[in-house]
Image: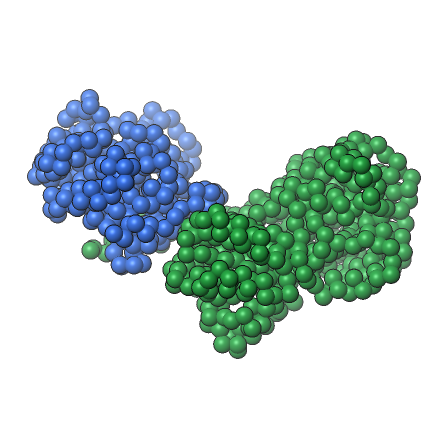
Amino acid sequence: MEFNNSPTVDQVGIEERIARFNSRSIKKQSKIQGLKLALNMIDLTTLEGKDTEGKVRQMCYKAMHPADDIPGLPTVAAVCVYPTFVKTAKKALGDSKVKVASVATAFPSGNSTLEIKINDTKLAVNDGADEVDMVISRGEFLSGNYTFVFDEIAAIKEACGKARLKVILETGELSTLDNVRKASDIAILAGADFIKTSTGKIQPAATMPVTLVMLQAINDHYHKTGKMIGMKPAGGISSAKAALQYLVMLHETLGNKWMNNEWFRFGASSLANDIILQLGKEQKGVYYSKDYISND
Amino acid sequence: MKEATSNEFFTDWKYAPAPESTDHIKLNKQYDLFINGKFVKPTSKKYFDTINPATEQKLAEVAEANEKDVDLAVTSAKNAYDKVWKKMPAKERSKYIFRIARLMQERAREFAVIESMNGGKPIRESRDVDTPLAANHFFYYAGWADKLDYAFPNKKPQSLGVAGQIIPWNFPLLMAAWKIAPALATGNTVVLKPAETTPLTALKLAELIRDSGLPDGVVNIITGFGKTGAAIVNHPKINKVAFTGSTDVGKLIQKSIAGTNKKVTLELGGKAANIIFDDAPIDQAVEGIINGIFFNQGHVCCAGSRLFIQENVADIVIGKLKQRLETLIVGDPLDKNTDIGAINSKEQLTKINDFIKIGIDEGAEMYQSSCSIPSKGFFCKPTLFLHTSQSHRIVQEEIFGPVLAIQTFRTVEEVIEKANNIPYGLSAGVWTDKGSKIFNLTSKLRAGVVWANTYNKFDPASPFGGYKESGFGREGGLHGLMPYLSF
């Protein structure tokens, strides 16, 4: 298979490139524009054992109305929940443009049979999920059983039907950037619409180096086939500044075509509030207390 | 698949201008010669303008030293050597060098901004590379000053006397540090001449040295053109000549000191091969190519100006290079987001443009970034030449600008032969995932520095210098002490 020819990755070179992205100075209009864009790219997420329908409904409202006291803010891109809360979220979001994403396939470990994973996926899709966030079988990947990983993603893609499939590589468990590149290539070739870094349950979650390697895999695929694949770093991105640094990386690696929530997402929960704080400061001229921003 | 939809707050993300402030910069209208610890008027009574190459505006007037001024400077250096510096215990000498390093760190921002104003290089580089590296050079050699007997055991290292040092315009402050720091650490005194287009940071360094309390005459900094440089080289009281610049001038220097007792080191031109194998980390190699040729607008003697790509990955690498070229920001050197600043002088821009014309006439295929360049000032678009061959002048001669000549190769033997088939031998780059390949090439490439899976990395502890017409003698590291000592 083609993913046996994944290019090698040099960690030192990747880190130097990241340092260059982070030395970009994003000020004034480009900052405001970037922050609004980042807000519009967020998958507002709650993935806890103690989630309730009430919490999901509150989050959905926040997704549609991030901060009504600041005019001109976009909504977030989607909410991300467990399959059992898809119905609740769908109903709460009504006919807004905010999408419902559901994790599936025995999230977060992925340790289950294919049958159960397919049923898990179908449960979410039948309840109305627009997007499915699956996890790959890291154990099989690390043992070198790449075709198993490929086949499993292809099967889940089929079960998704019209829903877009995001494939979580759980890069925190893949140990090398070479592995991240290989897993990205497998997921893309197996039919992923998006590739995603992490579940958020394993540390480290999203980092700029792994995200850059994944963006380069997407770039190579695009230049080979003309087909665009989306990217979602998830977990660990909590500051507006970090979000802007990711956007710089996206801008200089894939370009303007990817600079929208159709092709790029942030999986995050606390990021939205920091962006709201920064945008509020730009409009009001002063930082105000975080107590003015709802924690939903 | 559906095409991306644009929305109302987002169409095309551009970085807003982020200019570095120049409010804190104080430049005199006129700069004199720094001789014997004081700024003195030139006996020539002549001054010349120094400009900002990004705006073509005059920054200051600078004195032109004639033979008489050079004599004053060399005599003051000789007196300082005989009466003070030679006799001073090495540990005391080192304290002065440390002090210069500390002061340079404290005033790093000022030096970085002036370097960009006078030389045209992007503030990102003058701030993150030139200035910190210059300070580090003083720190590094300060440490050696009282350890020379351990560096060269049983060899009884002795200082030489007065070193005449002539530096180029591409790294004005950094080259001054490369020259002055080892000379002082080994107990020599200095007469230094910066290039005529970029004298300001060297003159600011003169102010810093005066403020540091270094004994008068130990470092003298005088400005002028080639004639001034020749007067330094030919002065009978000069014991050591250190030159960084073009190979042509290097040859003249070599001729003029023939038959004298003067020691000499020359760091001259280059036309480095940057070699990409098919098993290289391709995306990082592309960064290395970009950094190799476009760092400091290509005004780098060790620039990776000849690119060799293994044939089976050539299309991929060239495609990625073209894509990356589009994201390079060319413009105001003082903008923090600028990747490629201004060409150092009108003369250099003319030379680069002449070479671009030669490349086209030779039948190579030119590719340039679609970026726009400012209408005022000296700017050049980053340029690639595809389908070049070994006999093209753009492959054989040093262009010293943002112009990359690309060739392909099939076998290791072929690329080694092509890489070495050039009068220069300063540096080279090798990109491969395979360690054994790296060691094979580093032993066969006739180049003073070979970088593996990186490019343009400098460190005070690492010696730097050339083979063949790229010069001789090493600067940096333990090796950098030797040209300033007799044993």
The quadrant in which residue B118 appears is: bottom right
**For the point 27% across and 40% down, which residue is it?**
A144
Quadrant, the C terminus of chain B: top right
Residue sitting nearer the eye, A17 or B336: A17
Residue B369: x percent and y percent?
A: 45, 63
Q: Name the residue rendered at 32%, 52% in the picture.
A: A5
Q: Residue furthest top?
A: A50
**Residue A109 picture quarter:** top left
With B86 as the anchor, is B385 left or right in this view?
A: left
Colouring convention used in this rendered image of the protein: by chain
Is B158 displayed left or right of A190 in the figure? Answer: right
Q: Residue at x 59, y 68 (%)?
A: B396
Is residue B23 shown to the viewer in this render?
no
* Residue nearest the viewer, comparing B176 with A136: A136
Location of residue B142 with respect to B308 vertically, above or below: above
Chain A: drawing colour? blue
Residue A144 visible: yes
* Residue B207 image offset from top left, x and y in percent: 76, 43
Q: Which chain is green?
A: B
Q: Quadrant of residue B89?
A: top right
* Quadrant of the rendering where the N terminus of chain B is positioned: bottom left
The reply, left or right, for residue B409 in relation to residue B146 is: left
